[in-house]
Image: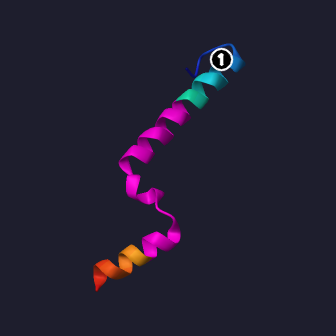
Amino acid sequence: MAVEPDIRRRRQEMWTLIAAHERLWHLRHADADLPPDDALVEAATASS
């Protein structure tokens, strides 16, 4: 990918790689998608 002479193609490949990494992160961190208020309430009830 780094030696691709066409800058437009290299940019597209980079965005595809970034999007795949973002999807993987969201799959691995599904609980991080909670809104902040819900996460605080959940943490408070778990520690009680």
Residue 46, quarter of picture: bottom left
Residue 22's place in the image compared with 48, above or below, is above
For badge 1, the amino acid type reads Arg
Q: Which residues are magenta?
A: 17-40
Q: Residue furthest top?
A: 5
Left or right: where does residue 45 sit relative to residue 3? left
Residue 16 colored magenta? no
**Color scheme of the displayed model:** rainbow
Residue marked by disc 1: 9
| Secondary structure mostly seen in the magenta stretch | helix
Residue at 36% x, 47% y is: 28
Instruction: Give residue 17's position: percent from left, percent from top.
Output: 52, 30
Of residues 32 and 7, which is closer to you in this image?
A: 32
Residue at 51% x, 73% y is: 37
Residue at 56% x, 28% y is: 16
Instruction: Give residue 13's position: percent from left, percent from top.
Output: 58, 23
Count of number-bearing discs: 1
Of residues 36 and 24, which is closer to you in this image?
A: 36
Query: Are there few (<14), some (14-19), or many (20+) residues within 10 Å of tag 1?
Result: few
- Quadrant that contains the N terminus: top right
Instruction: Give residue 7's position: percent from left, percent from top.
Output: 70, 19
Label 1, secondary structure: give it: helix
Residue 32's place in the image compared with 46, above or below, is above
Q: Residue furthest bottom?
A: 48
Residue 47, quarter of picture: bottom left
Residue 19 colored magenta? yes
Residue at 28% x, 86% y is: 48
